[in-house]
Image (cartoon, rainbow, N blue to C red):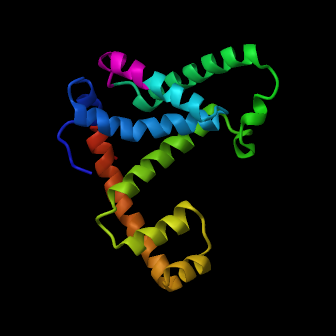
């Protein structure tokens, strides 16, 4: 990830900043799609919601006030689009809407689903930015162990690494992610933690 002087939110206020919009799209389109899917929409429907949200952002990003939470603003926008879509869909096909939701998400509120997806999206964004910082097997061991929950024994066999090497890889990558995440918050939003 390249360190920028201005935040990503400031960059996308300039509709001519193609690189800023590409980075914004690369980060937020998957977030919006995954959130819509976890709220019960299918692939095309989720893509439609993401596209609708991005279109609203293009037209309203200049109105966004920095003192407000971008995360909250984006979540509310996505939730409104999803509710509108589900309302139209419910009028057409009443039964079975809850059956579309994954079992693990049924007990979660939309806000909890959003927070999980927000955090996962930013974590994956950080991990992707580390591709050139580690040997491929180090990052692969981390992803298999932490992101996919694969048992250490299976990773050890698959990658030819000892248990200790896997734990060391996890520790090294997590340390770098913490640093990168702070840098990312600064670059994207102009805030630091």
- Residue 35 occupies which quadrant of the picture? top right
**Is 99 placed above or below 130 here?**
above
| Nearest the eye: 86 or 178 | 86
Q: Residue furthest right?
A: 95
The answer to whether residue 172 of the structure is visible from this angle is yes
| 82 is within the stretch colored magenta | no
| Region in magenta | 54-66
The percent coordinates of residue 13 (x first, y second) are: 26, 24
| 56 is within the stretch colored magenta | yes
Total numbered badges shown on the rendered structure: 0
Q: Residue at x 43, y 78 (%)?
A: 168
The percent coordinates of residue 108 (x first, y second) are: 69, 38
Characterize the magenta stretch by its predominant secondary structure.
Answer: helix
**Is 186 placed above or below 66 here?**
below
| Nearest the eye: 110 or 145 | 145
| Side of 121 relative to 90 (left or right) | left
The percent coordinates of residue 151 (x first, y second) are: 62, 73
**Is 129 placed above or below 169 here?**
above
Q: Residue furthest left?
A: 5
The percent coordinates of residue 81 (x first, y second) are: 55, 20
Q: Residue at x 63, y 38 (%)?
A: 38
Q: Residue at x 71, y 42 (%)?
A: 102
The answer to whether residue 75 of the structure is visible from this angle is no
Q: Residue at x 26, y 35 (%)?
A: 20
| Nearest the eye: 97 or 149 | 97
């Amino acid at each position: 990830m390249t360190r920028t002087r201005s935040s990503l939110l400031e960059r996308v206020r300039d509709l001519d900043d193609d690189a800023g919009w590409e980075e914004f799209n690369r980060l937020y389109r998957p977030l919006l799609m995954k959130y819509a899917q976890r709220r019960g929409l299918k692939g095309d429907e989720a893509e439609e919601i993401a596209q609708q949200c991005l279109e609203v952002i293009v037209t309203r990003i200049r109105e966004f006030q920095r003192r407000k939470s971008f995360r909250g603003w984006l979540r509310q926008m996505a939730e409104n689009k999803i509710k509108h879509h589900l309302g139209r869909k419910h009028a057409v096909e009443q039964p079975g809407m809850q059956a579309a939701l994954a079992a693990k998400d049924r007990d979660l509120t939309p806000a909890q689903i959003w927070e999980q997806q927000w955090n996962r999206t930013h974590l994956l964004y950080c991990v992707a930015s580390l591709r050139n910082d580690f040997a491929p097997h180090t990052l692969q061991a981390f992803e298999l162990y932490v992101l996919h929950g694969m048992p250490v024994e299976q990773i050890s066999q698959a990658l030819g690494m000892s248990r200790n090497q896997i734990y060391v890889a996890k520790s090294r990558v997590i340390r770098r992610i913490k640093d990168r995440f702070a840098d990312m918050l600064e670059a994207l939003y102009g805030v630091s933690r």
